Structures are given as structure tokens and as C-alpha cells.
Image (cartoon, rainbow, N blue to C red):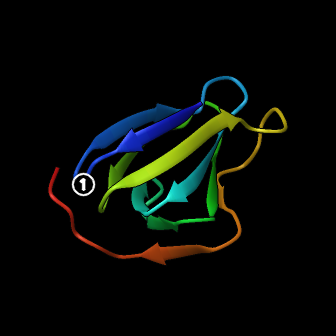
Amino acid sequence: MECSLGKGDLLRLAGGSKGVLLRCLKGTVWLTNGDGMDYLVYQGCSFELKAGVAAVVEALGSAEIGLEAAACEGATVRPRRGFLPAKIAIEI
């Protein structure tokens, strides 16, 4: 599934039973999932959300993301290629 977001748009994700792979197709999104870190996911990069974990995604500008079920049951929360952990403050 693909989704277009405008600057400041928020999206709540749930990892479901298999986890979710978020791919940033255009722009940059900010992601937080309660692990004490914030992540910036840039165009061409992805982030894997663990099964059963929720996250909030915010578009830092016009952005497009793709969402798909993670490849394996019980995947761990880990940034995938091209991630940048960031300590940023954004009011929601």
C-alpha cells in the first residue's frame, strides 16, 4: 500500500501480527516507536517495525511511503539501510 503525506501529516502505524516494513519513496519522514529513539527515514530508505509495536510517522515535507507486511514473523525493531537516528523535538 502506498500513501501520500503533506508536510506535518501524521500517521499511526501498528506492527500487526507480522510487523510492517515502511519504505520512504519520496521526501523524509520522522518516526518514533517508543524505544527512546527518533528516526529520520529518507527517500530510498526503509524501517522495519516489529510485530505488535505501534509507531507515529510525521512527514517533514511532502512525502510518499509504501507499507507492506514484514518478511518474517517476530521481526525485531531495527532501522534498515539508510537510517539516521536523530534526537529531534517535534510537538504533536
Q: Position of residue 35 (x, y in %)?
A: 48, 56
Taking the view exactly as shown, the residue that stands out farthest to the top is 17
- Residue at mark 1: 7
Q: Is residue 23 above or below residue 89?
A: above
Element type where label 1 sits in the image: loop
Q: Is residue 62 above or below residue 65?
A: below
Q: Is residue 84 left or right of residue 18?
A: left
Taking the view exactly as shown, the residue that stands out farthest to the right is 72
Q: Position of residue 85 (x, y in %)?
A: 49, 74
Q: Residue at x 56, y 55 (%)?
A: 25
For the residue pair 35 and 72, the one nearer the viewer reads as: 72
For the residue pair 76 and 25, the one nearer the viewer reads as: 25
Q: Position of residue 44 (x, y in %)?
A: 62, 65
Q: Dividing the image into 4 quarters, which one contains the N terminus?
A: top right
- The three-letter amino acid code for the residue at tag 1 is Lys
Q: Position of residue 52 (x, y in %)?
A: 59, 30
Q: Residue at x 72, y 49 (%)?
A: 76
Q: Residue at x 78, y 36 (%)?
A: 74
Quarter where residue 75 is shown: top right
How many other residues sit within 10 Å of disc 1, few (<14), some (14-19) or many (≥20)? some
Q: Is residue 49 above or below residue 68?
A: below
Q: Is residue 40 left or right of residue 25?
A: left
